[in-house]
Image: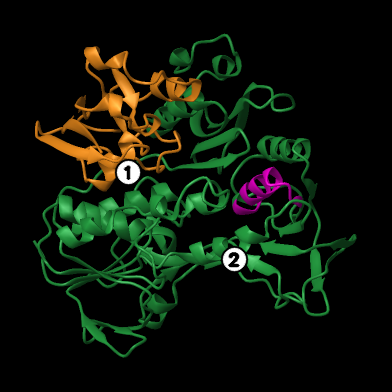
Chain colours: A green, B orange
Amino acid sequence: MSDGPLIVIGAGQAAAQLAASLVQYGFKGPLSLIGDEPYLPYQRPPLSKKFLAGEIELEQLFLKPAAFYEKAGIELILGSKVIGIDRKASAVVLEDGRNLRYATLVLATGSRAREVFLPGIGLTGVHVLRRISDVETIRPQLLPQRRLTIVGGGYIGLELAAVATKLGVKVSVLEQAPRVMGRGVGPLVSAFYERLHREEGVSIATGTRVEGLQGSDRLEHVVYDGGRLEADLVIIGVGAVPNIELASEAGLAIDDGIAVDENCRTSDPAIFAIGDCASHLRSTSERRLRLESVHAALEQARIAAAAICRQKVPPLQTPWFWSDQYDVKLQMAGLSAGHDEVVVRGHPNEGRSFAVFYLRQKRLLAVDAVNRAAEFMVSRQLIGEQAQVDAGRLHDETANLKEVRL
Amino acid sequence: MVKIVFEEPDGNEHTIDIPVGLSIMEGAVKNMVAGIDADCGGTCSCATCMVYVPQEWRERLPPMDKPEKAMLEFCPHVDESSRLSCQIQVGPALEGLRLKVPDSQR
C-alpha cells in the first residue's frame, strides 16, 4: 500500500467521502484536506433547500464532526487556498507561501457558479448561491413582499424559487432556454415544473434573455429582451464551471473537466481527481463524463480510495440525482441521451405525481420520477442491469412494477 | 443522548450515543457505523441507509410514511423488518434499540 503523505485539494463532499473511505481501508499515511472555506466539509444540496429555508442548523450540514478527523489523524487546513501544484517537487503551494509535499495528490476542487457578464452585475443586491457564505448573505433578504428575480431556471434557481416563495417573497424566474431544467430532464418534466411554480405563485418566463441590471447604487431593475422588472434582489443561477485551473496549469490532461481514467487517476499517476471537477472515464461508456452530482462525487471518492489503497475498486452504479421543490420530490436515474422512446406513467398535466421513462431499443436508459419513489427505485435497478422493459406495462398504472421486465 | 446498538456487516457490534432529535442515520454516519452510506444526506431520496429492526422493536418505532414505504418496496436486500434510518428521529423511547446493517446498500 502506498502510505506516503496524501494531500486532498478541496474539502467538499468528495473529499470527505475519500477521507472516510481511506480510513475504512486502513490508510496509515499522513492525510491532509485543504479547503478554501472556513468550515468542516459539508453537504451543499441543502444550501438551496432546507438550510436556505432555515429548517436545519449549520452543524447539520457537516458531513462528519470535527472529532472524526481528529480521531483519524486527518489534518484539516481550512480557509486556505492552493495557488499551484509543483509536480517536479511533488508539492502543493499554498497562498501563505507554504509548500506541502505529497506522495499522492487528490484534486477535489469542485465547481463554481458560472459568471455572467452583464451591465450592472456589480450592483449591490446581486448574488450567486453556491456556498454557506452566500446563504448567509441571501437569507436575511428573503422577506415578505421583497421582489426577487432569479436569472436561470435550473435546479438551484428553481429550488431557491420554491424556498423564497414559501417565505412570502415575490419571485420571478427568467430562463434563456425554451424550457426550465433543460439540461437535466425531458420536456414533459420541464413543462410540469413550469406549471408547479406558477401554481405556487412564481412568475416564470422562458426564452427570455437578460440584458442588464440597473440601479443608481443598489439594484432597482432587471432589463430583459421583453421589458424590465422591478427587483430588490437578483440571484444568478446559470450553471457551474469545473475548477480545473490548478490542474491545467500543472499540465494535466483536461477533457471538459480534469481527465481521469476508470480509477479516477489523472494523466499523472500520482494524482487523482474526483467530484465535480473530474471527467470520469466510465467503463460502460466510450467517452468521459463530468457529472455534477452528489452521487458521482461519492462514487468517485470510493473508487479513488480503493485504487490508492490497492483494494478492489467498487463497480460503477447507475448515476442518480434528486431535487426537492415544494412538496415535490424529483428523483432521476440514468442518462437519457440517445433514447428512441419515451413512456409516461401517470399524468404530467394534472396533479403532482408521474414518471417518465426513456428507452433505447426497449432497454431502459433513464427515468425522471416525480413523487414516484417506487418507479425510481425499480428503474435504478433495471437501468443498471440494462434490462429490456415492456413499454405497455410501464405506461399502465394498473400493471405491477415488479412485472415490467421483458 | 440515546444508546443505539448496530450489528455491522462483519458481525461487529457498534454502540453509539445519538443526541435526541437527530435521525438514527445522522448518528450512524457521524460515528462511522459501517454499512450506512446515506448518499442523499437524509432526504429519503436514495435508500442507502436501510437497517433491519428486530421484531420486538418494530411497533415502538414511528410508523412509515408513504415515501419511505415506496422507497423500501424496491430497495435491494429489503425484508419485512427493513426501515430507512434517516426517517427515524431519536427519542428516549429508543434507548437500547438494536439494529442490523445489511451487507450492502446496493
Instruction: Residue under label 2, please give it.
Output: A137
Task: List x then y, in percent, for residue A305.
Answer: 22, 56
Q: For label 2, count other residues whose C-alpha is less than 10 Å away and answer few (under 14), some (14-19) or many (20+).
A: some
Q: Quadrant of residue B21?
A: top left
Q: Quadrant of residue B11?
A: top left
Q: Residue A134, position in %: x, y?
A: 56, 65
- Same subunit: marks 1 and 2: yes
From what the image shows, is residue A403 above or below residue A113? above
Estimate the x, y position of residue B41 in percent, counting from the top left. 40, 43
Say which element carries label 1. Answer: loop
Q: Name the residue tied to disc 1.
A: A316
Residue at x 49%, y 62% (from the top left corner): A132
Q: Image height check: is B60 above or below A309? A: above
Residue at image point 34% right, 72% down:
A78
Relative placement, left or right, of A72 versus A213 is left
Single out the residue that lies furthest toward the right: A227
User: Label 2 sits on what residue type?
Assistant: Thr
Q: Is residue B49 left or right of residue A380?
A: left
What range of the chain is rendered magenta?
Answer: A156-170
